[in-house]
Amino acid sequence: PAKTMDELVSLCKRRGFIFQGSEIYGGMQGAYDYGPLGTELKNNLKNAWWRAMVYERDDVEGLDAAIIQNKHVYKYSGHEDTFTDPMVDCHECKSRMRADHMKDIKVCDNCGSDNVTEPRDFNLMFKTNVGPMVNEDSYTYLRPETAQGIFTNFKNVVDSTSRALPFGIAQIGKSFRNEITPRNFIFRVREFEQMELEFFCKPGEDEKWHEFWVAARKQWWLDQGLSEENIQFEYVTGDDLAHYSKSTVDILYKFPHGFEELEGVANRTDYDLGSHTKAQEEFDLSAKVKKNEHSTAKLAVRDLEANKWEVPFCIEPSAGLDRGMLAVMTEAYTEEELENGSTRTVLKFKPHLAPIKVAILPLKKNKPEIVALAKELKNKLQKLGLGRILYENTGNVGKGYRRHDEVGTPLCVTVDFDSIEKDDAPVTVRDRDTMEQIVIPAAELPAYIINYFVS
Ligand code: ATP
């Protein structure tokens, strides 16, 4: 794995994974742009999540809610009142910082001075104005989590799919938080993507489902290539527990800057649906919720056995896509000493996450027959639907291998003179991790590739 953030940052920029946002204007703190390969990696990680959370289950539906929502959503969700971080100002160097790590010793992160203010609450939501009139009522917020769109659509999803408990709603999308101190590359940023599942169940079954999802989510991260020794659980208790949560387990990963939260799995009880429901007094809510004077829907389901309407409990595994990418890249980063004394950098991504699946490299760039066969193979492999297959005609295969090791391409295929001179046209397939090369007939390449990626 990567030992320092710097080696990752530099590889990401050099090879086109991640760029500083607004770089040509001096940058924008806490915002990053995903380049050609970062976009592929991100899409692959999203797709792997969607596959595991929606397609491979029969009790989860997908959703894609709007980023800007009615401001009442954030009034009743509790974000307007409580979505804050404690902030401290330093009198000496004038910097501002997040103070949640300053429980006992209060010193400035930047200059070390203890001449700092008492912590005060800073709301992390970005406020924005909606419509052409700017007045007291025309504001709303950019969503600070995707979850609220799931709760406000609860009734729509139940009515349109006839779901009964237990079932879940999954969503992937952008969230925005005006972090006081964004840092550690894409670990803490102001614009990021979340992959969230809200899994609804009967009260009383919540603890069982919470345990289930903690284990399932850890397994999913292992399936993305993270290793067991780099994952830890943190049981969040007492004061650190969010206002809506009965219990939370954070899944931590060993990032280059230490073990930090990658995903949180919270038991949110009936807090969210209870908060957004009308006629709250008709239900036996366990969570303390604000009285709702605006909602037009009852967010409840019929419990046939008890013959009453009930607000479900909710278990929420909430993962950061950007943090996930950082974890996967940290884990995949490998520097290997070769027999000839040189070192190579390899990103050992799991094949399903690799930004480029296969690179096809003709050995001679000006030989029409070789070029034609290489292009034909590219088109054939592209049609398999595995992701990006790259045809790359630079004529320098050695350099091509090095570049593709560095961006994590699992297989390189070279097409050379032998390939066109014999009837059965052999091609060479080189494995990223073992660097072994095998020769197979070009006609067998698609089957070989499918077998490699789909297993
Ligand atoms: P932290 O304590 O690190 O601020 P959090 O507990 O506020 O995180 P949650 O509200 O539980 O985070 O959000 C769920 C997930 O969303 C986190 O586990 C993380 O992966 C991701 N996430 C939250 N804030 C950010 C951010 N500023 N930048 C990138 N990812 C984030």
Image (cartoon, grey):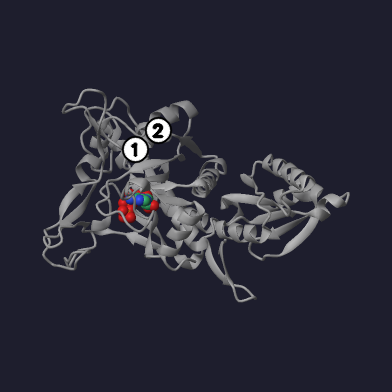
Q: Residue furthest top?
A: 132
Image marks 1 and 2: residues in contact by CB distance under 8 Å? yes
Please give left or right for residue 357 compared with residue 439 in the image: left
User: What label does residue 208 carry, if any?
Assistant: none
What residue lies at 44% left-to-right and 68% top-to-bottom?
Answer: 3
Residue 400 placement: quadrant: bottom right
Q: In the visual, does 28 lie left or right of 425?
A: left
The residue at the point 35 percent across, 59 percent down is 184
Q: Position of residue 11 (x, y in %)?
A: 48, 59
Residue 253 coordinates in the image, percent (x, y): 42, 61
Q: Is residue 159 above or below residue 183?
A: above
Q: Position of residue 441 (x, y in %)?
A: 82, 52
Q: Quadrant of residue 6?
A: bottom left
Residue 115 versus residue 295 in the image, above or below: below
Quickly name the residue at label 2.
Answer: 65
Mark 1 CB in 8 Å range of ligand 1? no
Q: Residues within 10 Å of mark 1 (few under 14, many from 20)?
A: many
Q: Is residue 426 visible?
A: no
At x 44%, y 56%, the residue is 326
Residue 397 locus on image (x, y percent): 68, 58
| Of the pair 281 and 84, the residue shown nearer to us | 84
